[in-house]
Image (cartoon, rainbow, N blue to C red):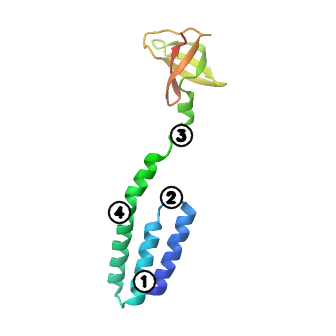
Amino acid sequence: MGVLFWACAVVAFVIAEVVTVQLVSIWFAAGSLVTLLFSYFYKLTAVEQLGIFIISSSIFLLLSMPFIRNRRRKEDFIATNSELDIGRHATVIETINNDKGTGRVTLNGVNWSAVPEDENEIIPEGTIVIVKKVMGAKLLVAPEK
């Protein structure tokens, strides 16, 4: 291994980082650069070069972790589609009855399976309900008051 190898490694890791944009290989690119510099100025064995690469990449990773954690905490929460449906009004198109295992509603033109918020409650067809929770392909609903 030598200077040319580490120069190619720097380029490869930078390209991988640019393509993924996920902070996947930036630490390896920096570790390769450090190893490149050491290899240029000192005559090192392949094992020594590999050691410098592993240690420097690890140091860059450890130094960047607090920054990454803080950045993730600061990002705004973005609701998913199912979370956007909570609190919306739906219309019962099939009587909701847990005992019989029935219940369907339409919400924004989509037909959903539904269960009542109160297990024992029966909600008749035509009732306007409020979505309380999205549970996969089912909605937990309560009658509008």
The amino acid at mark 2 is: Gln
Q: Give the CA distance from mark 2 to mark 1.
A: 26 Å
Upstream in the sequence, badge 3 or badge 1? 1
Of marks 2 and 3, the one in the foreground: 3
Query: At x 53% / y 29%, what residue is drawn?
Result: 137
Q: Could you say which disc has been placed on residue 22 in the image?
A: 2
Of marks 2 and 1, the one in the foreground: 1
The reply to whether discs 4 and 3 touch (Cβ–Cβ < 8 Å) is no
Question: Above or below — where is 82 with respect to 58?
Answer: above
Characterize the local packing of mark 1: few (<14), some (14-19) or many (20 or more) Cα atoms within 10 angstroms.
some
The reply to whether discs 3 and 1 touch (Cβ–Cβ < 8 Å) is no
Q: Give the CA distance from mark 2 to mark 4.
A: 17 Å
Residue topped by disc 3: 78
Upstream in the sequence, badge 2 or badge 3? 2
Residue topped by disc 1: 37
The reply to whether discs 2 and 1 touch (Cβ–Cβ < 8 Å) is no
